[in-house]
Image (cartoon, rainbow, N blue to C red):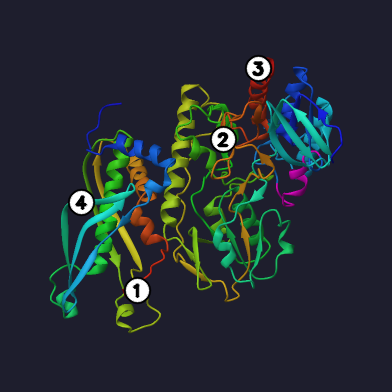
């Protein structure tokens, strides 16, 4: 097999899989984000710490995100809308999956682009029609991939990346959510 | 039982199905004294734990055990449950297996460097034990089955015999391996509205280029792939059974065939919330995965036929239509609305090792073994998925496994 250089350290992931198979406690991660309300529907979200491998961890740098609504919602548009953050997560998760699976399968990638469209009927959140749900009705992801591989191999990369995607799972399957006042 | 004598035998085989009887055949060939303990009668699971219409997935010409093969009039057909039970019964007779029926093993424990076997009939001591009690002793149900409203009747494949047994109304069949697709088809043909919940599955055509798909699996060597060559053995051992059915028409029973029968397809059942079944929205991808995997397999068959000069003997290469995704993919179903009168859980099976008081069962309830050599001296297993080869759980797959496992056992006794 020729050496591919997609930049994913697949060996480290495979080693982690073997190590964590016998140590499920160490595999328990907690991801965190904290939002602070600014004004109107604009808030600022900070992400830095998380828990995993049995201890507190931090990202190299803190990331700061602005969330707001667009002007057509009569808002200040100082950032993207919360539901857009969901498709940001989906696109990046699936793209990371494509790169990882390609590395593992010895497929050299030249370019990968994912376009995500989420169909959203806003009558739900406005309370205009109780039969309409609040969230997305349908999400479509389109990948354009240039790689040393057949179309069938590329389709298999994309299928496998969905199979192992945390965000794809979180969006397609129900998750228990607890919201409380501290 | 106190005061009763303890019977001594060199080897105890647990289970008189095809696996236990194959073990017995090779033990007899090596003159190793043994008994085969059977809780019911020979081929008990085939007689009592299968639905009425079931036939083997393997064609009759492939039906063979050490010293006996199918020689009936229909080599391309598939044995019924009565026929396979008769076949295994004949195997027991021909091989002269020392079977003790109606003898239930209630406990096996280590005693010094031997094993003590407690049965419904008394105590035994032996140097070696072969576990051939099967991989499908209990239906495996998801935890949320307990959250299904009591108004909905629930059945496992062990309870199910034929459609007439179910209440009138809609049926939700859960799981799309061989069991799930067969029961969904049968229930739809009985006139009931059927919804099938589909997770990851293995799609296969019944025939390919004019030959049974299992002919290809065998001829190309896929079925012979050894457990120590398989890329991800844990995954291979958990693989659901392929979407196949044995019918005289040799019909393919994939998702498209079920759609044409009017079966409604939904995603993997993920949870019950407020009396509603919630299904995964990832149905499209499980279809893609199965379609891609099937096409890759057929590609390897075509390559093999070309490379080995078989193109002239078989039909031209075929490609099958991608699995059609339902236009209105339902994500939830109100279990209290009356739409669903019964649920059939085709969510797999697991072995029962409750009687095995030797620490060789892992956290997931599976036996720790290396190709049937269990992690305790003198303890062996047969008839489990990909035990030594991909064909391990098929009737004709037992011969090679049993020969090798009993070879190891003989070496252990001689050491």
- Please indicate whether residue A87 sits to the left or right of residue B230 in the image: left
- Residue occupied by mark 1: A180
Asked whether residue B35 is in view, the answer is: yes
| Residue B185 as seen in the image, left or right of residue B306 | right
Q: Position of residue B59 (x, y in %)?
A: 67, 36
How far apart marks 4 and 2 lie (CA) works out to: 39 Å
Tags 4 and 2 touching, CB below 8 Å:
no
**To which quarter of the image does residue B8 belong?**
top right
Query: Compared with residue B284, is residue B317 higher up or lower down, i.e. above or below?
Result: above
Which residue lies at the image location 66% right of the left edge and 65% below the top edge?
A: B191
Figure check: A74 above or below B408: below
- The answer to whether tags 4 and 3 share a subunit is no
Q: CA gap, disc 3 to disc 2?
A: 20 Å
Query: What residue is shown with label 4?
Result: A59
**Magenta highlight range:** B42-54
Q: How many marks?
A: 4
Q: Hey, which quadrant is residue A147 in on the image? A: top left
In the rendered structure, find residue B53 and report the number of the disc placed on it: none
């Amino acid at each position: 097999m020729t050496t591919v250089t997609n930049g994913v350290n697949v060996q480290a992931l495979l080693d982690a899989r073997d190590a964590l198979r016998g140590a499920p406690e160490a595999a328990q991660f907690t991801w965190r984000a904290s939002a602070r309300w600014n004004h109107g529907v604009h808030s600022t979200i900070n992400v830095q710490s998380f828990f995993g491998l049995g201890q507190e961890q931090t990202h190299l740098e803190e990331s700061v995100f602005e969330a707001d609504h667009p002007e057509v919602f009569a808002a200040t548009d100082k950032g993207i809308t919360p539901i857009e953050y969901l498709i940001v997560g989906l696109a990046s998760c699936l793209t990371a999956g494509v790169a990882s699976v390609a590395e593992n399968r010895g497929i050299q990638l030249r370019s990968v682009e994912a376009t995500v469209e989420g169909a959203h009927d806003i009558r739900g959140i406005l309370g205009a029609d109780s039969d309409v749900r609040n969230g997305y009705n349908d999400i479509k992801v389109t990948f354009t991939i240039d790689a040393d591989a057949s179309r069938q191999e590329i389709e298999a990369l994309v299928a496998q990346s969905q199979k192992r995607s945390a965000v794809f799972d979180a969006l397609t399957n129900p998750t228990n959510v607890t919201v409380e006042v501290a | 039982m106190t005061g009763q004598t303890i019977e001594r035998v060199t080897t105890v085989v647990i289970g008189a199905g095809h696996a236990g009887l194959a073990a017995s055949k090779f033990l007899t060939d090596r003159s190793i004294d043994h008994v085969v303990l059977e809780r019911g009668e020979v081929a008990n699971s085939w007689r009592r734990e299968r639905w009425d219409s079931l036939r083997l997935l393997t064609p009759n010409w492939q039906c063979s055990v050490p010293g006996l093969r199918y020689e009936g009039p229909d080599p391309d057909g598939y044995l019924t449950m009565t026929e396979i039970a008769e076949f295994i019964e004949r195997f027991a007779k021909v091989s002269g297996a020392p079977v003790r029926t109606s003898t239930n093993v209630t406990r096996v424990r280590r005693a010094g460097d031997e094993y003590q076997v407690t049965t419904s009939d008394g105590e035994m001591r032996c140097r070696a034990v072969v576990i051939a009690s099967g991989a499908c002793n209990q239906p495996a149900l998801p935890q949320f089955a307990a959250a299904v409203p009591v108004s909905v009747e629930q059945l496992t494949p062990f309870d199910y015999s034929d459609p007439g047994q179910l209440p009138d109304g809609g049926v939700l069949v859960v799981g799309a391996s061989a069991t799930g697709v067969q029961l969904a088809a049968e229930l739809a043909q009985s006139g009931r509205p059927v919804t099938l919940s589909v997770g990851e599955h293995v799609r296969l055509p019944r025939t390919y280029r004019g030959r049974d798909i299992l002919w290809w699996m065998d001829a190309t060597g896929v079925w012979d792939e050894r457990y120590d060559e398989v890329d991800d053995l844990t995954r291979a051992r958990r693989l659901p059974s392929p979407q196949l059915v044995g019918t005289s028409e040799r019909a393919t029973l994939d998702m498209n065939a079920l759609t044409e029968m009017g079966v409604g397809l939904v995603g993997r059942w993920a949870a019950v919330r407020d009396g509603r079944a919630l299904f995964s929205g990832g149905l499209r991808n499980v279809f893609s995965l199965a379609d891609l995997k099937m096409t890759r397999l057929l590609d390897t068959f075509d390559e093999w036929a070309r490379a080995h000069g078989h193109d002239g003997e078989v039909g031209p290469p075929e490609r099958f239509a991608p699995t059609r995704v339902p236009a209105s993919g339902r994500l939830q179903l109100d279990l209290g609305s009356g739409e669903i009168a019964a649920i059939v859980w085709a969510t797999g099976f697991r072995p029962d090792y409750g009687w095995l008081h030797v620490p060789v069962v892992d956290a997931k309830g599976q036996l720790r073994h290396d190709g049937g050599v269990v992690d305790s001296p003198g303890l062996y297993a047969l008839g489990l998925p990909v035990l030594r080869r991909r064909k391990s759980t098929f009737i004709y797959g037992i011969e090679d496994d049993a020969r090798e496992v009993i070879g190891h056992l003989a070496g252990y006794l001689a050491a």
